[in-house]
Amino acid sequence: MTQIYQQFAYNNLLANHRLLSAAEALGPGEFEAPRTSFFPSIKETLNHNITVDWFYVDALEGGTLGAKAWEDPAPFNKASDLKKAQREVDFRLIRFCATLTLESLTRQMKFYRFDEPLGNVLSHLFQHQFHHRGQAHAMFSGSSAPPPQLDEFMFASDHADRVSDLKELGLTEQDLPNFQGITKDE
C-alpha cells in the first residue's frame, strides 16, 4: 500500500524534471508571457507548484514554515533556478515517502488549518501537482517549446522513455520503486 506513494513521488520528480526542462527551452520572454489558465503564465503556474510543495513537504517533515512558503508567490524568474529548487523538494518528498508505513498513513496530521490523515495529505499534494502541471502543459501548446510527454513513468514498459530523464537526475531504473505494479505480498 505504501508503494503507490513512493511511485507517485518518483513520478512527480520525473514529470517536474521534464516539464521544467521544456521551460528551460522556451524562447526569451515565453516563460513569463501571458497565457490562458488559472495562473496567467507558465512561470506563475510552476512557481505556485513549488511554493505549495515547500509548504506541504515542510509540514510532512515536521517543520513550521507554514504560510511563509508562499509569501513570495513567484520566487523564481528563471526556469533553470526553479528546476534546481523543484528537484531539491522533489527528492525530499521521495525520502519522506520511503519512510511510510501502513500505520503512518492513518496518522492524523495537524498543521496550518488542516487536521487530516497523512494518506489524505499525500493524495492531495500529488493531485495538486498533477492539476497544475496539466495547466502548464497546456500552456506550452502556444509556445516555441512543444508540450513534453508527462505520463511515461509508471509502467515497466515505459523504461525506454525515461532512461534519459533518469540519467539527467543521476538515477537508474534500480533506484525506482517497483514500477511494474504492486506485488501480491504488499
Image (cartoon, helix red, strand yellow):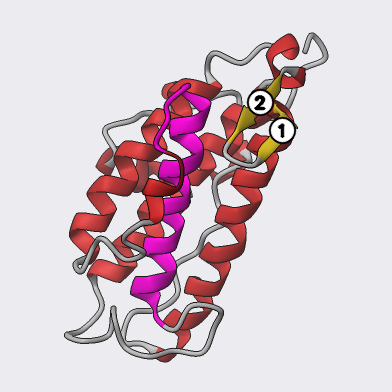
Q: Quadrant of the N terminus?
A: top right
**Residue positioned 19% across, 59% down in the render:** 80
20 over 58 or under it: above or below: below
In the foreground, 161 or 37:
37
**Residue positioned 33% across, 48% down in the render:** 86
In the foreground, 38 or 159:
38
Q: Quadrant of residue 106?
A: top right
* Residue on which the image places disc 1: 115
Residue 111 within the magenta-colored segment of the rendering: no
Image x and y of residue 79, in percent: 24, 65
Image x and y of residue 120, in percent: 73, 36
Q: Quadrant of residue 3?
A: top right
13 on left or right of 11: left
* Residue on which the image places disc 2: 109
139 on left or right of 106: left
**Residue positioned 50% across, 31% down in the render:** 59
* Label 1: which secondary element: strand
Read off the magenta span. Answer: 41-65
Q: Earlier in the sequence, mark 2 or mark 1?
A: 2
115 on left or right of 130: right
Kind of residue at disc 2: Met
Kind of residue at disc 1: Asp
Real-space Cα separation, disc 2 to disc 1, in angstroms: 5 Å
Q: Is residue 179 in view from this perspective?
A: no
User: Of helix, strand and loop, which mostly describes the magenta segment?
Assistant: helix
Image x and y of residue 109, in percent: 66, 26
**Residue positioned 30% across, 61% down in the render:** 21
Number of other residues with Cα within 10 Å of mark 1, as a class: few under 14, some 14 to 19, many 20 or more: few
Residue 47 within the magenta-colored segment of the rendering: yes
Q: Are circles 2 and 1 on residues that touch, CB within 8 Å?
A: yes
Furthest residue toward front: 113
